[in-house]
């Protein structure tokens, strides 16, 4: 199984900050990576797929990059509605696995 | 706009079978190019992919659950279902249904249902 790790597990930031979340796979996944945002009591929402492709309707302040085993989600200017938990997911090989999440809260 | 809605009992006794249904609106479970998935979220923890059924009825399961798992579809009702046998407290989770692409290169989940909490307890 491909293990996914995320760092940090949590972070505190202010509105307007640039935020970066890192996801690492235990083996190369050839950009087969998605990012999700989950707010309390809600289902995860797709933000990006194929590592860097923005899902329709997602604000352009979200971006993704990476290759091989290491991937990054960046929020260029944190907005109040962005406080949430972020998960990465690899779909390169079964079983399709998620990272443990990064919680972004208000400083 | 495709919408998914989970339904089923919120409480299941240990050793019994957990059964959930996902009703799809705004799209068809038999549409080529998609598969229909189940994912669960253990309390306060991360997300675990359970399995999916392809538009043509083929299934693909997480090996960790495959011995207890059946996913099926009813195209006449535009629904797909999950059955997990011999449940224990470790199966207590929020269960989500979601749409997924049908190829390895389209393996993200979108959209998701709102989720339903299933508690395994006597």
Image (cartoon, coloured by chain):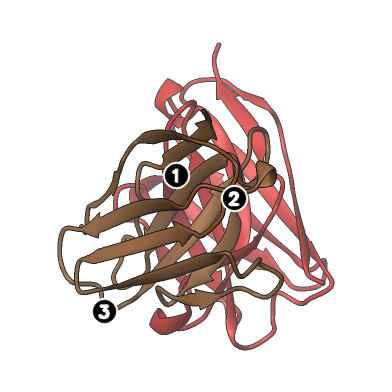
Chain colours: A brown, B red
**Residue pushed farthest left?**
A27
Q: Residue at x 57, y 49 (%)?
A: A78
Asked which secondary structure carries label 2, the reply is: loop
Circle 3 chain: A
B115 horizontally vs B84: left or right: right
Crowding around mark 1 (Cα neighbors within 10 Å: few <14, some 14 to 19, many 20+) is many
The residue where tag 1 is placed is B47
Q: Residue at x 39, y 53 (%)?
A: A20
Residue A32 seen anywhere in this rendered image of the structure: yes
Task: Give me the C-alpha separation between circle 2 and circle 1.
Answer: 10 Å
Quarter of the image containing the N terminus of chain A?
Answer: bottom left
Q: Of circles 1 and 3, which is in front?
A: 3
Q: Are marks 2 and 1 in contact (CB under 8 Å)?
A: yes
Task: Give me the C-alpha separation between circle 3 and circle 2.
Answer: 23 Å
Crowding around mark 3 (Cα neighbors within 10 Å: few <14, some 14 to 19, many 20+) is some
Earlier-in-chain disc, 3 versus 2: 3
Q: Residue B102: percent from the left, percent from the top?
A: 51, 81
Q: Which mark is residue A44?
A: 2
Residue sitting nearer the eye, A29 or A71: A71
Taking B31 as reference, is B109 above or below it?
above
The residue where tag 3 is placed is A30
């Amino acid at each position: 199984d491909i293990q996914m790790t995320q760092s940090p597990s949590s972070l505190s930031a202010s509105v307007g900050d640039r935020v970066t979340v890192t996801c690492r796979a235990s083996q190369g996944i050839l950009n087969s990576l998605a990012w999700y945002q989950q707010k309390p009591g809600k289902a995860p929402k797709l933000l990006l797929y194929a590592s860097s492709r923005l899902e329709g309707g997602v604000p352009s302040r979200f971006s993704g990059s990476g290759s091989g085993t290491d991937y990054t989600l960046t929020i260029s200017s944190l907005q109040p509605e962005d406080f949430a938990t972020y998960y990465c997911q690899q779909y390169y090989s079964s079983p399709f696995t998620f990272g443990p999440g990064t919680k972004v809260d208000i400083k | 706009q495709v919408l998914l809605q989970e339904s089923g009992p919120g409480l299941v006794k240990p050793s019994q079978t957990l059964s959930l249904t996902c009703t799809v609106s705004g799209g068809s479970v038999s549409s080529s190019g998609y598969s229909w998935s189940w994912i669960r979220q253990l309390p306060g923890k991360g997300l675990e992919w359970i399995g999916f059924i392809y538009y043509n009825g083929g299934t693909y399961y997480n090996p960790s659950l495959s011995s207890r798992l059946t996913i099926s579809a009813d195209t006449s009702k535009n629904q797909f279902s999950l059955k997990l046998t011999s449940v224990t407290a470790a199966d207590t989770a929020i269960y989500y249904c979601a749409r997924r692409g049908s190829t390895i290169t389209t393996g993200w989940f979108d959209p998701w249902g709102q989720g339903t909490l299933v508690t395994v307890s006597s």
